[in-house]
Image (spheres, coloured by chain):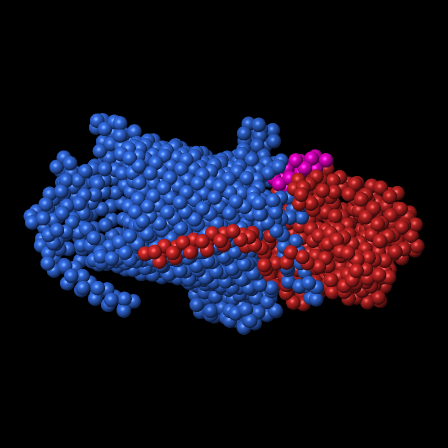
C-alpha cells in the first residue's frame, strides 16, 4: 500500500508538469432561456482536467488554445466548445431528459435511450456508491422499478434480487449480472438446510465481489426482449454493469470512509421483566420433600449440608416464578468456582442486561483509490478498494480487497485491443449462525431464554475462564452435571465455534476490435471468471454439540469465447440499420469437495481433518462441467429517428439436456415509436415514446439431471452401503420456455421538469425444469421433470420530477413503483400444490394452483359461521386438522422507492425511502418466544385488571378472544401458562405477520468544497465530504421486534424468520478527493 | 492486420469445430456410481429400518412417551401427544418409504436382473426372499402406524400420486408374501454375504425362523378381528418360529460414529438430559422387584427410584433415567425376538389356537428370556416369576392383562412394538398425560405433506379410515 501511494505521487507530479502551457479561461454556463445552470462539469476533452461551475454557472479552468471543453450537466445535452483566443466563454446548454441518454444494452451495444423498444432503467455509479454500500445488489434497493430486493441483516449475507417476479418454481430467479458484456457468476453456496432455517451460515452471493467504486453505470434490463441475446441465463433479467474507463491525462480519486453501526432497537426483542426461569411454577421440587418453593430446584448448593433454592438452570423458558428481590436463590454462577458469586445466593430479579447488550457497536472502514489515464494510443485504469467491516456479533468480520485494472490500446487506426482484470479476495470470519440452530444466538435470545440471566455476566464468565461456563447447566447438583444442556455460553460459542471463509477471484477478459469499414466492425473476446473458495466450520471441544471441523473447497470457472460482427449503416436518408451476428461458446465447471470430521475432535483447538476422533467420513465430491454453444443475430432498423424495429434470434445447444432435445431458440421482436417527433410544436410535451415487444427465451436444465446415480453412505463396519438418491432424474427433459410481452410509455413534460416511464408486462414461464416434490410413498423426495406454468403480470412506473430548480436551490425526485401479480397456472398432473420448502413450526412455502407463487401454508383456527375463532371447552383455540390452509402469501402488493435530492449551493442532500406494501412473514421467533414467556404480551394485565399470570383462582388468567362452539362469546378464563400465547396452544396462522415496511433506507449530505478554494490547491480537482447513513429508520412496520425484510438467505424460500437478526443502523463519513 | 484476422478466423473455426462434438458428455456424473451391488442397498435399507425403530429422536420416534416408558423433564409436546409441531408422522413416513422401502425395492430389482452364474439361482432366490421379508416387516409397521397406506402403488416413481390401499387388504397380501418367502427360502443355499446381512450374517436358516416369527406377529395382530385367519397363520408358523433368544433378529450397533446406536447419539453425544424414566413403568418395576429395573434405568442423584410424571415438569436430578446399558454406543437393537414370540404363544394358547405347551409355560419362557437378554440370571427370573403378582396363575386380571403388563415391561426400549402391543392387548391401562392434546393415539395422523403432494388419495384415505385423527383405530384394533 505504501509503495502504491508513492507511485501515485510520482504520477501526479508528471501530471502537473505535463500541462504547463495553459491559460485561464473563465465563463458561464446558461440554459436556453439564458438562466445560469449551476454546478455544470467542465472537462478538457480527452484529459482529466476539469472544473465545476458554481451556483451561478460561473467557472474557470486552465486550458490551452485549440483544446476542446466538454460541458455537461444533468438534464442537459452535453456540449463541446473549442477554446479560441478569447479568455471568456459563454455556453448555452439545451435541456434534455433522462430519456435521451445513451444506455448500454445487451452484449455491450450502446444506443440512445429514445429508440429503445423495451424497458431499461439506468442508475449512475454515483447513486450506487453515495452511501458507500459495499454490496452492489443491496445498493439498488428502491432505485429501480420492477426490481425487488430482499436482504437479511447478517454480515456479508446474500441479497435476493428478483426482476419482475418469481418465474421459476424451484430454479433460480436471481437476475444475471453482466459486467462490460461478460456474465459474472452470482452463485450462492448456502445449503438447502440453511435456506430452510435449519442452521448453517449465509455465505453471501458471489456478486458481492463487484467493486462499486469501479462502476460507471448500471442498466437494468427487465424483460426477456431486452435480454434475449444473452440466452437462457437472462430469462430473469439482467443487471448490466459498465465499468469506468480510463481517459487521457491522469485522474486520481480517493475515497476514505468510516462507518459506525449499531442495532436498531425497534427490530429487536423487548422482554418482560416480571417472571424468570421455568416452564411452570411447580414441579421443580416437591413440598413433600421440604421444598419451600416448587418453582425452584431444591438441593444443597453451597456445601453446608442444607438444601437451598436453586434456579432451574436447564429450563430455557421464562414462565417461572415471579421476580421477588427479597427472595434469595442460587443462580447459575453459584456453580462457577471462578465467579464472585460462587456458592452464593442472589436476589430473584430480572437481569439488568438483556441480549440487546450482546450486540456490539461496529466500526467499519472503506477506502479506495482509483486512477486512470492514457495517451494518444491508449488508456488505462487501475484501482484498489479495501473494505473492512465488523459485525454486530463478537468475533465477526468481513474483509474485502479488490484490485481492478483495465486498458485499451489502439494497435492500428482500426484495430483496438482491450483487456481488463479484477482480482478480489473476500475473507469472512465469524459469520452469523442462522435459522433454528444452536449456533444462532437469536434462537436462544428470541425463543428459548431465561429473563433472570444477565448477558454481561456470561461475558465475564467466558473472559474469566475461556471455558464454556453456561447459564444453562444440565444438572448442577452434581459435578458431572455442571455442563451445558442445550445452550453454550454465547461468548464461548462466538469465540470458539466460529467459521471462516475466503474467496479468491479473477475476473477479466481480453478482446480485439477490428473496424473493417466505417459501418462494419468485428470483435473477438475471451473472458474468464474463476474463483476458489473455502469454508471452514468449527464446533469447539466442550460445546453442547459434538466437536467438529468441516471444510468445503469449491472452485468455479467459466470461460466465454465470443465473436461478433457489428453493422451500423445508414441505408438511405431515412433508414439506419444496426445489426450484429455472433457466436458464443461457454464452458463452465464447478468442482467441490466437502469433508467433515467424525465423532469429535481429539485435540481441543486443533481444526484439521486429521484431528478427527474416528476415521473421517467419505468426502462429498462434485465435478459439474457444463457447455453451451450458441449463435445469435440481432438487427435494429430505424426510420428517421422516430420509428425503430428490433429483432433478435439466438440458438443454443446445451450439454445439460438429453441429445435431441438440447438445442433451442430464442427470439424477440420489438418496436418503438417516438410520437413526440410529430408533436414538436407542443411546448408542454418534451418527449414521448411508445414501445412494445414480444420475446420467447429458453432455458436448460441444471447439470446432471438426465441420468441417475447412487448415494454412498459411510460403510457400516464391513458392510458397504449404497442408497437411492432423494431425487429421481429424467432422460426425457426438454427446454423450459419463458414468453414475455411488454408495452411501455415514456413521456416527459415541461422541458423535462416532470415525466414518467411506465411498463406493463406479462410473462409466462412454461415447461419448467423442476424437481417436483412428490409423496415420499414413491420412494423419492422429488422427481425432475418438465411441468408448470407461472404467470407474472405487472406494472412498473418510474416518475421523475424537479419541483424546484433555480440557481441556488434544486429539488429532484425520482419515484419507482412496482406491482407484480403472479399466479401458478399449471403444475404437474393432478397436483394442485408444489411445496417449495417446509419449515420448523409446521409451515411451508408453496406454489399452489390458481394462487400466487409463495403461499404460506399451515394450521389455522377453526372459525365459527359468524367468522369468529372457536375456543374449545378447555378455553383454548381449536385448530384445523388440515395443515395445508393458506395462511399467508410472501409476495408484496407493491414495492417502491422515493429518492429525493436537494441541492443548495455546495451542499446536496439525498435520501431514499424504500417501501414494501403487503406480503407476509411467518415468525418462528414469536411462535416459540411467546410460548416461553419472553415478551411483554405474556405478562399483560387481564380483563379484570389483574396480572394475567396469576392463577385463575386468584383473579388471573386470560380469556382468549373468540366464541365457543355455540357462537357465544368465549368467557372461559384459562391459566396463562407455557404456550398460552405461543405455539402448541395456537395454530401457525397466529404467527403470520404483515411484512410491510417503510424505511428511510439511505441518506447522505455532501459538501463540495467550492471551486474558489479548490483552485488554490494546484493539483486537486475536487473535495467532497459526505455524512452518510444506511438503514436509518424504519418509519413503519407491522412485525413486532424484528425487521420485516430480514430473511435467511437469497433464494425462493422467503417469508420465514427464525432467530432473526436486528437491523444495523449505520452512520458514517466519507471524504472523496479528486486529483 | 491480416495476421490478426487470421488469428480471429482460426479461433472461430476451432470454436465451431469444438461445438460440433458430442456436447452431452459434459453432463456425465463422474463422482458417483450408476451401478452398485444389490446387497449394498439391502444392507442400507435394514440399517435405516433399525435406526428409526431404535431412535429416541423427538422428531421421529416418540413412542417411548406414548407407552409411558419415558417421561420428559422439560419439553412436554410429545408426551402430551402433540405430534404436529415437529412433523413427526411425516418423518416416520419418510423413514419407512424413502429410507427403507426404496432401497429394499431397488435391491430386489437388481437381484431379479442378476443372471445366475457366480451367484447361484438358489442364492438369488434366497436374497430376494430375505429382502421381501424386510419389506413385509416395514409395511406392517406402516399399517400399524397409519392405517390405510400406499402399498400396491407405492415406491413407483412413475406414479407420483400413489393410491392408499385398505389396511386389511395390505395385511392379507403380506400373509401371502410371507408364505411365498418361506417357500422360497432354501437353507442349504447361501443368502447374502456375511458382512452384508446385518441381522443374521448370512444364516439363511435363521431367516426362515424370522419369516415364521414375523408371520406369528402379523397373525396375532389380527387375532381380534379375524380369529380364524390368525389361527391358521399362527399354527402354520409356530413350528418354524424362534425357539430361543439365539434366534433373535438383532441389529448390532458399533462403538464408533456414525454407526453407533441412535440412542447414544440422542442422549449421550447430544448431552441432553431431558429424557427420564416414566413413573408408570418405573413404579411397576419397583413394585414387582423386577430384576430388570437397574438394567433399564439408573436411579436419581440421591440414589432413589423416582419416575417422571407424563406431560408435566420433572427435574433431572430428582428423576431416574435410562441406564448406561440403554445408552451404550454399541447397544444392540432387536427387531423381533424370542420373548415376543413366546408371549404370542402364550396368547395363542389362551385364544384356543393349537400350540404345544400352556400359556403359563410360554409366559414364563418369555419373561425369563427377557430377563436374561437384559443381563439377568435364570434364578432371578425364577424368583421373579414366583411372586404372586407375576405368577401367571395369581397375577391380576384376565390373560390380556397378565400378558399385556408383562409384555409392556419386556418391550422396554422397543417403542414401536410396545405401542403396537398396548393398543392390541389394551393393557396396562395408562393414565392420560397431564395435558393431552387428544385422546390416546391409536394411530399417527397422515403426514402433513400428503395433503398437498397427494391430495386426492389423501382425502379418500382419510375418509375411508373414519377420519385422519389420532383416535381413529387401525382395522385390527377392535377393542
Instruction: Report the quarter where the N terminus of chain B lies.
Output: bottom left
Q: Is residue A262 left or right of residue A1018?
A: right
Query: Residue B51's spot in the image, x, y percent?
Result: 68, 57
Shade representing chain B: red
Front residue (pair A755, A120)? A120
Q: Is residue A173 left or right of residue A525?
A: right
Q: Quadrant of residue A155?
A: bottom left
Q: Residue furthest front?
A: B2
Instruction: Give me the residue at 74% from left, 46% from top.
Output: B144
Front residue (pair A258, A792)? A792
Chain letter of the blue region: A
Front residue (pair B104, A803)? B104
Question: Relative to residue A862, is residue A437 depicted above or below?
Answer: below
Residue B330 is a magenta residue: no
Instruction: Report the quarter where the C terminus of chain B lies.
Output: top right
Q: Which residues are magenta?
A: B450-464
Question: Relative to residue A974, is residue A484 depicted above or below?
Answer: below
Q: Main secondary structure of the magenta part?
A: helix
Query: Residue B235's spot in the image, x, y percent?
Result: 90, 50
Instruction: Give me the residue at 51% from left, 62% from top.
Output: A552
Q: Quadrant of residue A251?
A: bottom left
Query: Residue B347's spot in the image, x, y percent?
Result: 86, 50
Residue B463 is a magenta residue: yes
> Is residue A1017 among the parts visible in the rendering?
yes
> Is residue A746 among the parts visible in the rendering?
no
Question: Relative to residue A474, is residue B474 depicted above or below?
Answer: above
Amino acid at each position: 500500500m505504501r509503495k502504491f501511494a508513492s507511485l501515485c505521487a510520482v504520477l501526479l507530479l508528471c501530471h502537473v508538469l505535463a500541462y504547463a502551457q495553459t491559460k485561464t479561461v473563465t465563463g458561464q454556463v446558461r440554459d436556453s432561456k439564458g438562466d445560469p445552470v449551476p454546478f455544470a462539469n467542465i472537462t478538457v476533452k480527452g484529459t482529466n482536467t476539469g472544473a465545476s461551475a458554481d451556483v451561478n454557472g460561473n467557472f474557470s479552468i486552465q486550458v490551452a488554445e485549440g483544446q476542446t471543453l466538454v460541458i455537461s450537466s444533468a438534464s442537459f445535452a452535453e456540449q463541446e466548445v473549442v477554446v479560441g483566443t478569447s479568455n471568456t466563454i459563454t455556453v448555452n446548454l439545451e435541456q434534455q431528459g433522462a430519456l435521451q441518454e445513451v444506455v448500454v444494452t445487451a452484449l455491450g451495444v450502446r444506443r440512445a435511450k429514445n429508440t429503445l423498444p423495451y424497458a431499461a432503467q439506468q442508475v449512475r455509479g454515483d447513486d450506487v456508491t453515495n452511501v458507500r454500500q459495499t454490496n452492489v445488489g443491496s445498493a439498488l434497493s428502491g432505485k429501480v422499478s420492477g426490481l425487488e430486493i430482499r436482504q437479511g441483516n447478517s454480515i456479508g449475507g446474500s441479497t435476493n434480487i428478483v426482476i419482475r417476479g418469481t418465474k421459476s418454481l424451484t430454479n433460480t430467479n436471481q437476475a444475471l449480472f453482466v459486467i462490460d458484456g461478460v456474465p459474472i457468476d452470482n452463485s450462492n453456496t448456502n445449503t438447502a438446510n440453511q435456506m430452510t432455517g435449519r442452521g448453517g451460515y449465509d455465505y453471501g452471493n458471489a456478486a458481492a465481489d463487484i467493486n462499486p467504486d469501479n462502476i460507471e453505470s448500471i442498466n437494468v434490463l427487465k424483460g426477456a426482449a431486452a435480454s434475449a441475446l444473452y440466452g437462457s441465463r437472462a430469462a430473469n433479467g439482467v443487471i448490466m454493469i459498465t465499468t469506468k474507463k480510463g481517459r487521457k491525462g491522469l485522474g486520481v480519486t480517493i475515497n476514505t470512509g468510516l462507518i459506525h453501526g449499531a442495532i436498531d432497537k425497534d427490530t429487536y426483542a423487548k422482554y418482560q421483566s416480571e417472571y424468570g426461569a421455568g416452564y411452570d411454577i411447580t414441579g421443580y421440587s416437591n413440598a413433600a420433600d421440604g421444598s419451600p418453593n416448587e418453582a425452584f430446584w431444591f438441593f444443597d448448593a453451597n456445601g453446608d449440608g442444607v438444601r437451598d433454592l436453586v434456579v432451574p438452570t436447564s429450563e430455557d423458558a421464562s414462565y417461572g416464578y415471579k421476580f421477588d428481590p427479597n427472595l434469595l436463590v442460587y443462580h447459575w454462577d453459584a456453580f462457577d468456582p471462578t465467579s464472585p458469586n460462587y456458592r452464593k445466593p442472589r436476589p430473584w430479579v430480572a437481569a439488568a442486561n438483556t441480549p440487546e447488550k450482546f450486540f456490539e457497536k461496529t466500526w467499519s472502514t472503506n477506502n479506495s483509490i482509483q486512477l486512470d489515464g492514457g495517451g494518444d494510443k491508449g488508456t488505462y485504469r487501475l484501482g484498489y478498494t479495501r473494505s473492512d467491516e465488523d459485525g454486530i456479533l463478537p468475533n465477526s468480520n468481513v474483509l474485502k480487497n479488490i484490485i481492478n485494472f483495465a486498458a485499451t490500446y489502439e494497435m492500428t487506426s482500426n484495430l483496438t485491443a482491450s483487456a481488463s482484470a479484477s482480482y478480489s479476495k473476500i475473507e469472512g470470519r465469524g459469520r452469523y449462525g442462522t435459522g433454528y440452530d444452536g449456533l444462532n444466538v437469536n434462537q436462544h435470545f428470541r425463543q428459548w431464554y431465561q429473563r433472570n440471566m444477565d448477558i454481561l455476566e456470561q461475558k465475564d464468565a467466558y473472559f474469566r475462564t475461556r471455558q464454556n461456563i453456561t447459564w444453562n447447566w444440565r444438572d448442577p447438583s452434581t459435578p458431572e452435571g455442571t455442563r451445558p444442556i442445550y445452550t453454550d455460553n454465547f461468548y464461548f460459542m462466538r469465540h470458539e465455534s466460529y467459521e471462516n471463509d475466503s474467496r479468491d477471484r479473477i475476473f477479466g477478459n481480453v478482446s480485439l476490435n477490428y473496424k473493417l469499414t466505417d459501418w462494419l466492425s468485428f470483435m473477438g473476446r475471451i473472458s474468464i471468471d474463476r474463483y476458489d473458495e473455502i469454508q471452514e466450520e468449527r464446533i469447539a471441544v466442550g460445546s453442547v454439540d459434538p466437536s467438529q471441523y468441516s471444510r468445503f473447497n469449491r472452485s468455479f470457472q467459466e470461460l466465454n469465447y465470443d465473436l461478433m460482427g457489428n453493422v451500423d449503416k445508414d441505408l438511405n436518408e431515412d433508414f439506419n440499420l444496426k445489426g450484429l451476428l455472433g457466436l458464443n461458446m461457454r464452458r463452465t465447471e464447478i468442482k467441490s469437495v466437502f469433508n467433515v470430521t467424525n465423532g469429535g475432535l481429539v485435540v481441543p483447538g486443533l481444526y484439521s481433518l486429521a484431528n478427527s476422533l474416528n476415521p473421517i467420513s467419505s468426502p462429498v465430491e462434485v465435478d459439474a462441467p457444463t457447455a453451451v454453444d450458441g449463435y445469435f443475430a440481432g438487427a435494429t432498423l430505424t426510420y428517421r429517428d422516430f420509428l425503430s424495429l428490433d429483432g433478435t434470434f439466438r440458438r443454443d445447444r446445451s450439454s445439460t439436456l438429453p441429445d435431441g432435445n438440447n438445442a433451442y431458440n430464442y427470439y424477440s421482436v420489438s418496436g418503438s415509436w417516438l410520437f413526440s417527433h410529430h408533436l414538436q410544436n407542443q411546448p408542454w410535451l418534451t418527449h414521448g415514446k411508445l414501445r412494445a415487444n414480444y420475446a420467447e427465451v429458453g432455458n436448460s436444465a441444471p447439470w446432471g439431471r438426465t441420468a441417475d446415480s447412487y448415494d454412498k453412505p459411510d460403510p457400516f463396519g464391513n458392510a458397504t452401503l449404497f442408497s437411492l438418491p432423494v431425487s429421481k432424474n429424467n432422460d426425457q427433459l426438454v427446454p423450459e420456455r419463458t414468453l414475455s410481452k411488454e408495452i411501455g410509455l415514456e413521456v416527459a413534460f415541461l422541458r423535462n421538469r416532470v415525466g414518467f416511464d411506465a411498463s406493463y408486462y406479462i410473462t409466462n414461464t412454461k415447461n419448467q425444469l423442476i424437481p417436483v416434490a412428490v409423496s415420499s410413498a414413491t420412494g423419492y423426495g422429488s422427481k425432475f421433470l418438465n411441468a408448470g406454468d407461472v404467470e407474472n403480470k405487472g406494472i412498473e412506473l418510474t416518475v421523475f420530477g424537479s419541483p424546484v430548480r433555480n440557481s441556488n436551490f434544486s429539488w429532484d425526485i425520482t419515484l419507482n413503483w412496482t406491482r407484480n401479480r403472479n399466479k401458478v397456472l399449471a403444475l404437474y398432473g393432478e397436483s394442485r400444490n408444489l411445496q417449495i420448502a417446509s419449515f420448523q413450526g409446521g409451515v411451508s412455502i408453496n406454489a399452489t394452483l390458481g394462487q400466487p407463487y409463495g403461499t404460506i401454508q399451515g394450521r389455522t383456527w377453526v372459525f365459527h359461521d359468524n367468522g369468529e375463532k372457536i375456543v374449545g371447552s378447555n378455553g383454548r383455540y381449536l385448530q384445523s386438522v388440515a395443515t395445508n390452509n393458506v395462511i399467508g402469501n410472501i409476495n408484496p402488493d407493491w414495492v417502491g422507492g422515493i429518492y429525493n435530492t436537494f441541492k443548495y449551493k455546495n451542499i446536496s442532500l439525498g435520501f431514499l425511502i424504500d417501501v414494501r406494501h403487503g406480503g407476509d412473514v411467518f415468525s418462528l421467533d414469536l411462535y416459540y418466544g411467546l410460548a416461553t414467556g419472553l415478551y411483554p404480551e405474556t405478562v399483560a394485565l387481564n380483563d379484570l385488571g389483574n396480572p394475567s399470570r396469576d392463577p385463575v383462582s386468584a383473579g388471573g388468567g386470560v380469556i382468549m378472544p373468540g366464541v365457543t362452539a355455540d357462537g357465544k362469546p368465549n368467557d372461559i378464563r384459562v391459566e396463562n401458562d407455557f404456550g398460552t400465547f405461543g405455539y402448541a396452544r395456537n395454530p401457525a396462522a397466529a404467527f403470520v405477520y404483515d411484512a410491510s415496511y417503510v424505511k428511510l433506507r439511505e441518506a447522505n449530505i455532501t459538501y463540495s468544497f467550492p471551486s474558489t478554494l479548490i483552485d488554490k490547491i494546484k493539483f486537486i480537482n475536487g473535495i467532497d465530504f459526505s455524512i452518510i447513513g444506511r438503514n436509518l429508520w424504519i418509519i413503519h412496520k407491522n412485525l413486532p421486534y424484528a425487521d420485516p425484510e430480514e430473511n435467511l438467505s437469497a433464494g425462493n424460500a422467503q417469508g420465514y424468520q427464525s432467530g432473526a437478526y436486528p437491523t444495523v443502523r449505520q452512520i458514517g463519513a466519507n471524504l472523496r478527493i479528486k486529483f | 492486420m491480416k495476421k490478426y484476422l487470421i488469428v480471429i478466423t482460426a479461433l472461430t473455426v476451432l470454436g465451431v469445430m469444438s461445438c460440433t462434438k458430442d456436447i452431452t458428455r459434459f453432463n456425465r456424473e463422474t463422482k458417483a456410481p450408476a451401478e452398485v451391488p444389490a446387497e449394498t442397498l439391502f444392507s442400507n435399507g435394514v440399517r435405516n429400518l433399525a435406526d428409526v425403530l431404535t431412535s429416541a429422536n423427538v422428531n421421529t420416534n416418540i413412542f417411548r412417551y406414548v407407552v409411558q416408558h419415558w417421561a420428559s423433564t422439560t419439553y412436554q409436546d410429545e408426551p402430551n401427544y402433540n405430534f404436529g409441531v415437529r412433523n413427526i408422522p411425516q418423518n416416520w413416513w419418510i423413514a419407512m418409504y424413502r429410507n427403507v422401502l426404496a432401497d429394499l425395492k431397488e435391491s430386489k430389482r437388481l437381484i431379479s436382473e442378476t443372471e445366475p452364474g457366480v451367484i447361484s439361482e438358489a442364492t438369488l432366490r434366497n436374497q430376494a426372499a430375505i429382502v421381501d421379508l424386510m419389506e413385509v416387516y416395514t409395511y406392517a409397521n406402516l399399517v400399524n402406524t397409519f392405517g390405510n397406506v400406499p402399498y400396491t402403488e407405492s415406491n413407483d416413481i412413475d406414479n407420483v400420486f400413489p393410491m392408499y390401499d385398505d389396511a386389511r387388504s395390505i395385511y392379507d397380501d403380506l400373509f401371502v408374501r410371507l408364505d411365498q418367502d418361506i417357500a422360497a427360502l432354501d437353507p442349504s443355499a447361501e443368502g447374502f454375504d456375511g458382512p452384508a446381512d446385518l441381522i443374521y450374517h448370512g444364516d439363511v436358516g435363521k431367516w426362515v425362523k424370522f419369516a415364521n416369527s414375523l408371520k406369528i406377529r402379523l397373525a396375532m395382530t389380527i387375532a381380534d378381528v379375524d380369529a380364524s385367519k390368525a389361527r391358521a397363520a399362527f399354527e402354520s408358523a409356530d413350528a418354524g418360529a424362534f425357539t430361543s433368544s439365539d434366534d433373535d433378529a438383532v441389529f448390532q450397533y458399533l462403538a464408533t460414529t456414525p454407526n453407533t446406536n441412535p440412542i447414544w447419539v440422542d442422549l449421550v453425544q447430544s448431552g441432553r438430559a431431558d429424557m427420564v424414566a416414566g413413573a408408570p413403568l418405573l413404579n411397576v418395576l419397583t413394585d414387582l422387584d423386577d430384576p430388570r429395573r437397574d438394567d433399564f434405568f439408573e436411579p436419581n442423584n440421591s440414589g432413589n427410584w423416582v419416575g417422571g410424571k407424563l406431560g408435566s415438569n420433572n427435574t433431572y436430578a430428582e428423576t431416574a433415567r435410562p441406564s448406561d446399558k440403554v445408552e451404550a454406543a454399541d447397544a444392540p437393537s432387536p427387531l423381533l425376538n424370542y420373548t415376543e414370540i413366546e408371549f404370542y404363544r402364550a396368547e395363542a394358547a389362551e385364544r384356543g389356537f393349537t400350540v404345544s405347551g400352556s400359556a403359563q409355560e410360554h409366559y414364563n419362557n418369555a419373561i425369563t428370556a427377557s430377563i436374561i437378554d437384559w443381563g439377568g440370571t435364570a434364578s432371578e427370573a425364577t424368583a421373579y416369576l414366583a411372586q404372586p403378582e407375576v405368577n401367571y396363575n395369581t397375577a391380576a386380571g384376565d390373560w390380556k392383562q397378565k400378558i399385556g403388563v408383562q409384555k409392556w415391561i419386556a418391550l422396554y426400549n422397543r417403542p414401536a412394538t410396545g405401542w403396537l402391543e398396548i393398543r392390541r392387548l389394551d393393557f396396562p391401562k395408562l393414565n392420560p398425560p397431564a395435558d393431552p392434546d387428544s385422546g390416546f393415539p391409536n394411530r399417527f395422523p397422515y403426514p402433513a405433506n400428503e395433503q398437498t403432494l397427494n391430495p386426492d388419495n389423501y382425502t379418500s384415505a382419510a375418509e375411508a379410515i373414519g377420519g385422519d385423527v389420532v383416535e381413529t383405530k387401525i382395522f385390527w384394533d377392535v377393542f
